[in-house]
Amino acid sequence: MRERRDHFIGGDWVAAAAGGEIVVHSPATLELVGRSADAGPADIDAAVAAARQAFDAGPWPWTPARERAAVMRRMAAYMRERGDEIAELLCDEMGSPISFLKRGGGDGPSPLFEYYADLAETWPFEAPRQGALGPAVVRQEPVGVVAAITPWNGPLFILALKVAPALAAGCTIVAKPAPEAPLDAFYMADAAAAAGLPPGVLNIVPGGREAGEHLVRHPGIDKVSFTGSTAAGRKIAAICGEELKRCSLELGGKSAAVMLQDAAVESLVQCAIPLGLAFNNGQACAALTRVLVPRNRHDEVVDAMVSFVKGLKVGDPRDPETTMGPLIAERQRERVERYLGLGREEGATLAIGGGRPKGLDKGWYVEPTVFAEASNDMTIAREEIFGPVGVVIPYDGGDDEAVALANASTYGLGGAVFSADPDRAYRAASRIRTGTIGLNMFGVDPYCPFGGFKSSGIGREMGPEGLASFIEYKSVFNRARPEA
């Protein structure tokens, strides 16, 4: 049981103005996990005011980069020391298997903070340039007060993708975690307090959609950084467009794993399932959920995928042997089950799964599912299901048709191409319109830009590009003292 009854505003713990609270239950056991404060308009106003004061009056925006970096490293150290606690909370809060959460050492967001701390110390915040009017200095300044709105399916890591580069740039932040998984965000607040981050630089106010819209519309916000559904992203983009407010949007996906004729089936399957239908219980925006295969190899691929899925262990996410846990909520399971029905109705062949796992009567579980003999125009191949469902789509032509099918989507977030010939795989990958793509593998690298084409979003996170998204440019001319 975790109690986080107060918001983190202006460096202090502040009770919710209306006394609201969010109650969190485990999606695996349905037992009470904890409670957090629930933000209303007054709480959002207070958090924005604190961030606005901290930005306009400083000192964070003009604190030397090396000093900002030192604070960020202390935050990283604090969170690393509590890595096991954080992983266990996330496991209880959102149902991700503990084996998935502790993969890579259980560092959580700490490496991101360290990476952006290092980057800040070498970033060209001031650079001389010879202009047509004479010598100039191009300054890179923080964009201002940032609204960071994050989802429930990777809550603390995705929050770090926004907070770490924004802090490195010199911004101040109001973070609104999702109500399904609000508790983990307070570890970042604890880290900020322990590290000596100045008051108001980071404010954390969990809340629902109404709180999020109030935050997006707030005149004190300079930029919105949002991760979530494409539908919500469109609304946020419209609001920001009306107000000429900067925004970056990391949205949905329907990523394709493209098997070329010469690819090894083992290479495909060993990537396409762990990073597809089984990726974070199928709740990952970049998951490889469309599997495009030559028709003459379709049955071979389906047989291998079914065999792999049979080896997945679905159950208690606290069990280190579990590879797949529950979905986040009952409504999410109902959504996935609706798509399972549509897949059958539209003529796809159910190869495995398609229901609720036997013996798991409590919790929001869905069987890992593979549909075969699907077509790219079926609903299950076009829309983001956000559950443990993979769709195998056969094609008859060569590489050109495979690329065309991969591109025949409103999304463009992730993808992978499989071939025995690396050059052939690269040629195909270079023609697929997506933000991140792998050759005989797939992954998301925090040192490289991540984001989407088309309806998968606007802008990039991670890598130097992630820091650049929190920057404004200023040209400074000095005719009186050109030597300056």
Image: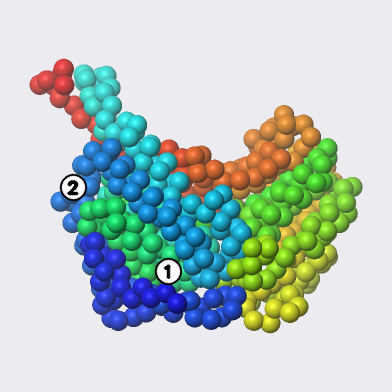
Q: Residue flagged by tag 2: what amino acid is it?
A: Pro
**Displayed quadrant of residue 329:** bottom right
**Displayed quadrant of residue 375:** bottom right
Q: In this view, does 341 lie above or below 408?
A: below
**Quadrant occupied by the N terminus:** bottom left
Label 1 sits on a secondary structure element that is: loop
Who's the residue at 25% across and 71% down the image? 14
> Left or right: where does residue 244 sit relative to residue 463?
left
**Displayed quadrant of residue 217:** bottom left
* Residue 117 visible at all: yes
Of residues 351 and 16, which is closer to you in this image?
16
Who's the residue at 27% across and 19% down the image? 130
- Residue 78 lies, in percent from the top left, at 37, 54
Q: Categorize mark 2 by other alpha carbons within 10 Å: few (<14), some (14-19), many (20+).
A: some
Q: In this view, does 338 lie above or below 251?
A: below
Who's the residue at 53% across and 71% down the image? 92
Who's the residue at 57% across and 46% down the image? 444
Which colour style is shown?
rainbow
Q: How many angstroms separate mark 2 from mark 1 (CA)?
A: 29 Å
Q: Which residue matches tag 1?
A: 182
- Residue 381 lies, in percent from the top left, at 70, 59
- Residue 252 lies, in percent from the top left, at 56, 57
Q: In this view, does 270 lie above or below 227?
A: above
Q: Residue flagged by tag 1: what amino acid is it?
A: Pro
> Left or right: where does residue 142 sit relative to residue 410?
left
Q: Categorize mark 1 by other alpha carbons within 10 Å: few (<14), some (14-19), many (20+).
A: many
Q: Do the residues labelled 2 and 1 touch (CB within 8 Å)?
A: no
Q: Which residue matches tag 2?
A: 59
* Residue 215 visible at all: no
